[in-house]
Every structure is written in structure tokens, then in C-alpha cells.
Image: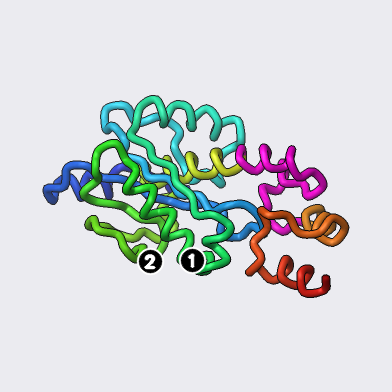
Amino acid sequence: MTKPDYSYELAALDRGFSYVSGVDEVGRGPLAGPVVAAAVVLDASRIPSGLNDSKKLSAKKRDALYDEIFATADVSLAQATVAEIDEHNILRASHIAMVRAIDGLKRPTDYALIDGNMTPRGLTVKSETLVKGDGRSLSIAAASIIAKVWRDRHMVDLAQQYPGYGWEKNAGYPTAAHKSGLENLGVTPHHRRSFKPVHNILYQE
């Protein structure tokens, strides 16, 4: 199984770019909660070992790497709210979050490696898209870990305010427990009204 490496970053540095970031987002599929993006510029001399696509790591490993990435890299986190998801659409909202994350780095990046096959609209720096980038580029893998851990923790916090939907376990994804919570308890302010299962319940009401 191939693991992410630093070759895309090195190729950009070889072409004269000086501050190369990896960018990823998490939370396109859930029915509730924000979509979260992270941008990470790794220090080539202090890359945490074990970086990989966040989906391939245990929660414990992700938590450990989360702290290590923050300690060694330039990290920026951003989100697009539920209101923005409903106003635009989930793809556009995830791109808004990505641009915000890139803009939030301590030092402006001059080259962004973007997970996926689309360049976010409004991005002002040179960039390259990488399909399944979190499994190919170490910087994107780091960004995927940051975004996922932060969003999972955020959904645990929201679950304490709105119990009964199972967000502490499902992070807002449409599991059976979440759908049953929606049917029994109704729609919260954190639900995405433009998403069909939520829209249908509102429509029934």
C-alpha cells in the first residue's frame, strides 16, 4: 500500500516556490455541523512520522499526530457554517472553508496542494489539485488529520448541547441513530436544512 510522501512539495520547491501548503476539508457528507478545512505547511526537517490519510489512522493515532503537527508546522483551521452550506451548497462551502484556511496561515503560502480535483474559486495563490491527495502528499495528509480531529471534537461538544442524535459517535453523518434522533426530536439549529433528510422532516412539519 502506498503511503503519502513529500515529493509534490519538493517538486514545487524545486520550481522556485518557497512556502508550500497542503489543504484538505472534512464534513461534506454529514447532515449537521460545519464543513471544516485545514491548511498545513510542514517543516521539512521536522515532519511527524506516521502521517497518512486520516481515514486510515486510529482515533488515538490521529489525536497524537494532531498535537505533533500543531507543535511542528504552520497550521490554519477554518470552517464554513451551516448557514453558508445552506446558502451556497456543500461543494462551494467546502471551497470557502479551504480559501479561509489558506488565508489564515501565519506566513502567506505561495503554492497550495489541494485535495480533490477542483481549484477553489477565489484562491489567489498558485495551486495544484491532487485526487486522493491525503494518501499521496504528506502536507495534505497532515491537513486531513487536523480538520478531522478538530471537527470530530466540535461535534462531541455539540452533542452535549443537543443529545439524542449520536453526534459524539457519528460526527453528524446520517447514521441510523442520527436519523432516528431527527425523526423523534426534530431539527436543531446545527442541521443543514438544504440536505434532503433534514429538508424532508421540516417539510413534514
x, y (%) of residue 168? 72, 41
* Circle 2: element type: loop
Q: Nearer the viewer, residue 103 or 180?
A: 103
In the displayed image of the protein, which residue is found farthest to the left? Answer: 16
Asked which quadrant contains residue 97, the reply is bottom left
Real-space Cα distance between discs 2 and 1? 10 Å
The amino acid at mark 2 is: Met
In the drawing, what numbered circle is on residue 119? none
Nearest-to-viewer mark from 2 and 1? 1
Residue 162 covered by magenta stretch? yes
Sequence order check: which comes first, mark 2 or mark 1?
Answer: 1
Q: Residue at x 49, y 32 (%)?
A: 66
Residue 36 covered by magenta stretch? no
x, y (%) of residue 62? 54, 35
- Mark 1, Cα crowd under 10 Å, few <14 / some 14-19 / many 20+, is few
- Is residue 184 visible in this depiction of the protein? yes
Read off the residue under disc 1.
91
Q: Residue at x 47, y 27 (%)?
A: 67
* Vertical relation: 202 (above or below) 12: below
Q: Residue at x 48, y 50 (%)?
A: 79
* Vertical relation: 132 (above or below) 157: below
- Mark 2, Cα crowd under 10 Å, few <14 / some 14-19 / many 20+, is few
Residue 27 shown left or right of residue 44 in the figure: right
Please state, as top left, top right, bottom left or bottom right, where the C terminus lies in the image.
Answer: bottom right
Asked which quadrant contains residue 68, the reply is top left
The amino acid at mark 1 is: Leu
In the drawing, what numbered circle is on residue 118? 2
In the displayed image of the protein, which residue is found farthest to the right? Answer: 184
Q: Are the residues tagged 2 and 1 within 8 Å (C-beta)?
A: yes
- Is residue 141 visible in this depiction of the protein? no
Over which residues does the magenta segment extend? 153-175
